[in-house]
Amino acid sequence: MAVILYIRKEYFRGVTLSDKSAHILEFHYKGQNVDVFDNGARVFHLEYFLESKFKANILDFYVTDMNLRGKGYGSVCMLEILDQLKKKQVTLIKSPIGYKLAPIGYTGPDQYLALMTEFYEKTGFMISGDGNTAIQILE
């Protein structure tokens, strides 16, 4: 059974990235996919699945250009998307961390897991005991 949340399809949000540069990001929600654009270029993509009205599972997400990674796009986009889901009464978000999901450009599982753990913790997630899942309770 599919659960549907209605989030405004397109909107703009002003953000400041880690290098202190200001950007106006355009968020596009289509079904359970979110694409984020900066000045017309897609910079972030996220797919999620609503297990129930209150539980969401992140299936995949990435910053689209390797040259944009590490600049803060992922963090500001993830925080904004989590905020929108929270406004729609989603209270639990889970995401797998596994290396098999890693995009190209990582030297191996250790580097990938260290970077992803840091990213998830920075965006408010807790890492499960086995290290395979990131979990966040939205309050």
Image (cartoon, helix red, strand yellow):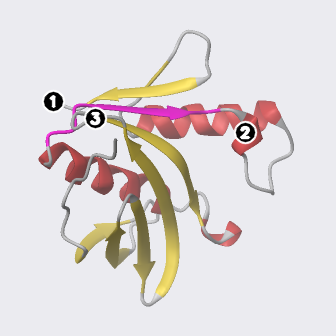
Q: Please state which amino acid type lies under the numbered disc 3.
A: Ser
Q: Judge whether residue 118 is colored magenta.
A: no
Q: Residues within 10 Å of mark 2 (few under 14, many from 20)?
A: some
Farthest residue toward the right?
Answer: 107
First in sequence: mark 3 or mark 1?
3
Whether residues under marks 2 and 3 lie with C-beta atoms below 8 angstroms apart, the answer is: no
Write down the residue under mark 2: 112
For the N terminus, the image quarter is top left
Q: Position of residue 104 (x, y in %)?
A: 80, 57
> Could you tell whether 43 is left or right of 125 in the image?
right
**SS at mark 3?**
loop
First in sequence: mark 2 or mark 3?
3
Q: Position of residue 29 (x, y in %)?
A: 33, 68
Residue in the picture at 49% in, 28% down: 134
Q: Is residue 50 above or below residue 81?
A: above
Q: Nearer the viewer, residue 125 or 20?
A: 125
Q: Is residue 45 above or below residue 21?
A: above
Q: Judge whether residue 92 is colored magenta.
A: yes
Q: Nearer the viewer, residue 102 or 52?
A: 52
Q: Please state which amino acid type lies under the numbered disc 2.
A: Tyr
Q: Nearer the viewer, residue 20 or 109?
A: 109
Q: Position of residue 82 (x, y in %)?
A: 29, 47
Q: Which residues are magenta?
A: 89-97
Image quadrant in which you'd find residue 15: bottom left
First in sequence: mark 1 or mark 2?
2
> Could you tell whether 100 is left or right of 124 in the image?
right
Write down the residue under mark 3: 52
Q: Please state which amino acid type lies under the numbered disc 1.
A: Glu
Q: Residues within 10 Å of mark 3 (few under 14, many from 20)?
A: some
Q: Is residue 72 at all visible to an observer of this figure?
A: no
